[in-house]
C-alpha cells in the first residue's frame, strides 16, 4: 500500500525546498534565493516517530497570466489534489501577500487538510507579526525556521496527527528508469506520454526541468519509477549554479537507475554532447536504450530508419549493444514499445550464466581463435552489469581486440541485449587463481 502524501506548497521563495530538504534529511531539492527554481513535483520518502510518508516539493504558485507560470501552478495544484496533508508555507519576514491569498483559495477548494506554516521566524517569543496570516482562514500559523530546524519537530507532530493510518505499506519499488539527454530533446514529453498525463512540465524553453523528478507508476501489473532529469549541457554553456546542480543531479539519476533512456533529437543527429551523456551511462555499467525522438519530423523512404540506425550506432560505437528505438513523444509513435524494451534490457542486465555453460562457450571460442596467452577458465562474478572474470597465464598479453572478440562471442551465445559487459582478466598459475 502506498505511503500517505504530504505536499509542500506556497508562493515562490518562501523556503519550500529548504523545508523539503530538512524533512527528508539531505540536499535533494535545489535551494537558491532565486524565485521559481523548483518547477516540477519532487518526491522523497520520509519518516517521523514510526510513521512513513512521501513528501512532495512543488513550484511556487503565482498569479501570472500563462506560460511557464501557469504550468508550474498546475503542477502544484495536481500535487495538492493527490496529497493527504498539505503544508502551506508563508514568509514571516515579508508578511501576507496577494499570492498567499491566491494559494489559500486553491487550498480551500481542494478540501485537503492544511497546516499553515510561517517560515523564516527569527524571534519565537514575539509572534505578533503573524497576525495578518489569520486572514487566510486556515487556522493558527505554526512558526518555524526551516533553515535552522527550529520548531520543525512540532510541525512533524502535526503532520503525523493528520496522516491516514497507512504506514504499514511497503516502500515503492519497480524498475528505476532514468531519462537523460541534452536540453529540449523531448525528455519530459516522453515521460508524460508514457504516463498518459502531464506529470512533468513540458515547455519549448530549454532548461525547464531542473530537478531529477521521480514518478512511480504501474503498467500491466509491473511497477516503474521514471526519473526525468534536467537537460545536460556542455560545461562551457553552464552559466549558473542552479544549472550546475541540475546537471549533477541528472548524472546522479543515472547512478541510481536500473535502465537509462538516452534521448536524442532526430532532427539534429548525434552530437558530441550526446556521446558524452551516453558515455557516462556506459561507464557506469547501466543497461541502456537509445531513444531517437521527434521521428515524425524526419522525411522518410523505406530505407530511412535502417540508415539512421546505422548512423546512430556508428557515432555511439561503444554502445552498440543498446537497442535503438525511433519514437515521437508528440504523436505517440512507438511509445508502446518503450516499457517492454525496458523490461527486456533490465532482465538482461541481471542475467546469470552457470559456470559450466559459460566455460563451454569460452572453450569453443578459444579453440576457434586461440589467444596469445592461455585462458584456463571463466566465471561470472556480478550482474548489473554482467561481469565475467577470465583466468589466464598472462592478463597483459590479451589485447583489446581479443577481449572484444570474447565479448562478441558471449553476446552471440547469451544475448545480454542492452547491457554493457565487464570482462576482467586475472593471472592464474596452472589454471588456479592467484
Image: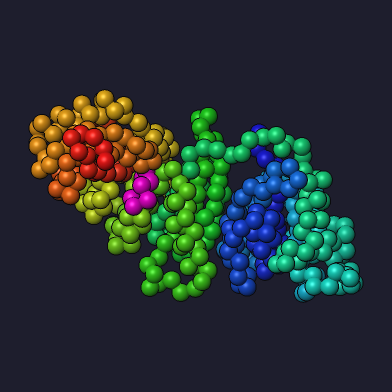
Image x and y of residue 337, in percent: 39, 37
Which residue corresponds to the image point at 67% horizontal and 40% vertical from the top-left? 3
Instruction: Say if 18 sits above or below 370 in the image.
Output: below
> On the picture, is 254 further left or further right than 3?
left
Image x and y of residue 47, in percent: 70, 47
Nearer to me, 139 or 174:
174
What is the tally of numbered marks visible in this picture?
0
**Would residue 73 be visible to someone looking at this image?**
no
Q: Is residue 284 magenta?
A: yes
Nearer to me, 87 or 120:
120
Range of residues picked out in magenta: 282-288
- Give the colouring mode of the picture: rainbow
Instruction: Say if 275 sits above or below 175 in the image.
Output: below
Quadrant in which the N terminus is drawn: top right
**Would residue 49 be visible to someone looking at this image?**
yes
Which residue corresponds to the image point at 32% horizontal and 40% vertical from the top-left? 387
Which residue corresponds to the image point at 70% horizontal and 52% vertical from the top-left? 7
Instruction: Say if 190 sits above or below 247 in the image.
Output: above
Image x and y of residue 292, in percent: 34, 49
Amino acid at each position: 500500500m502506498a505511503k500517505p502524501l504530504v505536499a509542500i506548497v506556497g508562493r515562490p521563495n518562501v523556503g519550500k525546498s529548504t523545508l523539503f530538504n530538512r524533512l527528508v534529511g539531505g540536499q535533494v531539492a535545489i535551494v537558491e534565493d532565486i524565485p521559481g527554481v523548483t518547477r516540477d513535483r519532487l518526491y522523497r520518502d520520509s519518516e517521523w516517530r514510526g510513521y512513513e510518508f512521501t513528501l512532495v516539493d512543488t513550484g511556487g504558485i503565482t498569479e501570472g497570466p500563462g506560460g511557464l507560470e501557469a504550468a508550474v501552478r498546475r503542477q502544484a495544484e495536481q500535487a495538492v489534489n493527490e496529497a493527504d496533508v498539505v503544508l502551506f508555507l508563508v514568509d514571516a519576514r515579508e508578511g501576507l501577500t496577494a499570492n498567499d491569498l491566491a494559494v489559500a483559495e486553491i487550498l480551500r477548494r481542494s478540501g485537503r487538510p492544511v497546516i499553515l506554516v510561517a517560515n523564516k521566524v527569527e524571534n519565537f517569543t514575539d509572534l505578533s507579526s503573524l497576525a495578518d496570516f489569520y486572514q487566510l482562514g486556515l487556522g493558527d500559523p505554526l512558526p518555524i525556521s526551516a533553515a535552522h530546524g527550529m520548531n520543525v519537530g512540532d510541525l512533524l507532530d502535526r503532520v503525523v496527527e493528520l496522516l491516514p493510518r497507512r504506514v504499514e505499506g511497503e516502500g515503492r519499488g519497480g524498475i528505476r528508469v532514468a531519462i537523460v539527454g541534452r536540453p529540449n530533446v523531448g525528455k519530459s514529453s516522453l515521460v508524460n506520454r508514457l504516463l498518459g498525463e502531464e506529470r512533468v512540465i513540458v515547455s519549448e524553453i530549454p532548461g525547464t526541468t531542473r530537478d531529477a523528478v521521480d514518478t512511480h507508476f504501474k503498467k500491466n501489473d509491473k511497477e516503474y519509477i521514471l526519473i526525468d532529469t534536467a537537460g545536460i549541457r556542455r560545461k562551457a554553456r553552464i552559466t549558473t549554479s542552479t544549472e550546475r546542480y541540475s546537471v549533477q543531479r541528472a548524472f546522479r539519476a543515472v547512478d541510481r537507475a536500473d535502465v537509462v533512456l538516452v534521448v536524442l533529437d532526430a532532427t539534429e543527429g548525434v552530437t558530441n554532447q550526446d556521446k558524452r551523456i551516453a558515455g557516462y551511462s556506459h561507464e557506469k555499467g547501466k543497461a541502456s536504450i537509445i531513444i531517437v525522438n521527434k521521428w515524425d519530423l524526419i522525411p522518410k523512404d523505406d530505407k530511412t530508419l535502417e540508415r539512421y540506425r546505422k548512423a546512430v550506432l556508428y557515432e555511439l560505437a561503444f554502445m552498440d549493444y543498446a537497442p535503438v528505438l525511433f519514437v515521437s513523444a508528440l504523436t505517440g509513435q512507438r511509445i508502446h514499445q518503450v516499457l517492454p524494451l525496458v523490461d527486456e534490457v533490465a532482465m538482461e542486465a541481471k542475467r546469470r550464466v552457470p559456470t559450466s555453460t559459460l566455460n563451454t562457450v569460452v572453450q569453443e571460442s578459444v579453440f576457434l581463435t586461440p589467444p596469445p596467452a592461455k585462458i584456463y577458465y571463466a566465471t561470472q562474478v556480478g550482474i548489473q552489469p554482467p561481469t565475467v572474470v577470465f583466468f589466464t597465464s598472462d592478463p597483459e598479453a590479451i589485447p583489446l581486440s581479443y577481449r572484444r572478440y570474447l565479448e562478441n562471442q558471449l553476446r552471440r551465445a547469451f544475448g545480454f541485449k542492452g547491457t554493457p559487459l565487464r570482462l576482467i582478466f586475472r593471472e592464474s598459475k596452472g589454471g588456479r587463481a592467484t
